[in-house]
Image: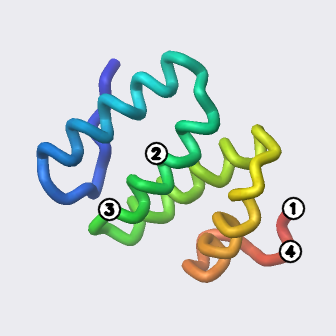
Amino acid sequence: MKEAVIGIGSAGARAALDTALLAAHGRGDGTALIGLYTQAAEAADDPVARSFYLTHAYVFALEAGDARAAPLKARLVARGAETDDAP
């Protein structure tokens, strides 16, 4: 089932990001998913959606042992969506 990317500005941007996310999920490309979910967070116009996408980017970064995990966590902590003492 295809689900639309929530909270992203224009329909064209949503569709392009949606397609890229689905393709990356299909390939199992965690590295791409980190970037795409980060991009979705930056484009989100809703604070809840922004936290949702950042959380996804963070989880994929943790799974991959990617260096982007630390700055993603810091962004989540700053938003109040994560605690500083969580692993």
Q: Residue 75 sits in which quadrant?
A: bottom right
Find residue 28 and report its horizontal and vertical position in percent.
Answer: 60, 21
Q: Earlier in the sequence, mark 2 or mark 4?
A: 2
Residue type highlighted by circle 2: Leu
The alpha-carbon separation of the residues under discs 2 and 4 comes to 26 Å
Q: Are marks 3 and 1 in contact (CB under 8 Å)?
A: no
* Element class at badge 1: loop
The residue at which mark 1 appears reads as 87
**How is colour applied across the structure in the image?**
rainbow
Q: Earlier in the sequence, mark 4 or mark 3?
A: 3
The alpha-carbon separation of the residues under discs 3 and 1 comes to 27 Å
The alpha-carbon separation of the residues under discs 2 and 3 comes to 10 Å
Q: Earlier in the sequence, mark 2 or mark 3?
A: 2
Instruction: Look at 61% across and 82% down and name the residue there.
Output: 78
Residue type highlighted by circle 4: Asp
* Other residues around mark 3 within 10 Å, as few (<14) / some (14–19) / many (≥20): some
Q: Nearer the viewer, mark 2 or mark 4?
A: 2
Q: Nearer the viewer, mark 3 or mark 1?
A: 3
The residue at which mark 4 appears reads as 85
The alpha-carbon separation of the residues under discs 1 and 4 comes to 6 Å
Instruction: Look at 39% across and 71% down and name the residue there.
Output: 47
Find residue 55 and report its horizontal and vertical position in percent.
Answer: 59, 55
Work out whether 46 lies above or below 55. Answer: below
Q: Name the disc covering residue 43, or none.
A: 3
Q: Earlier in the sequence, mark 3 or mark 1?
A: 3
Q: Are marks 2 and 4 in contact (CB under 8 Å)?
A: no
* Element class at badge 4: loop
Work out whether 52 lies above or below 4. Answer: below
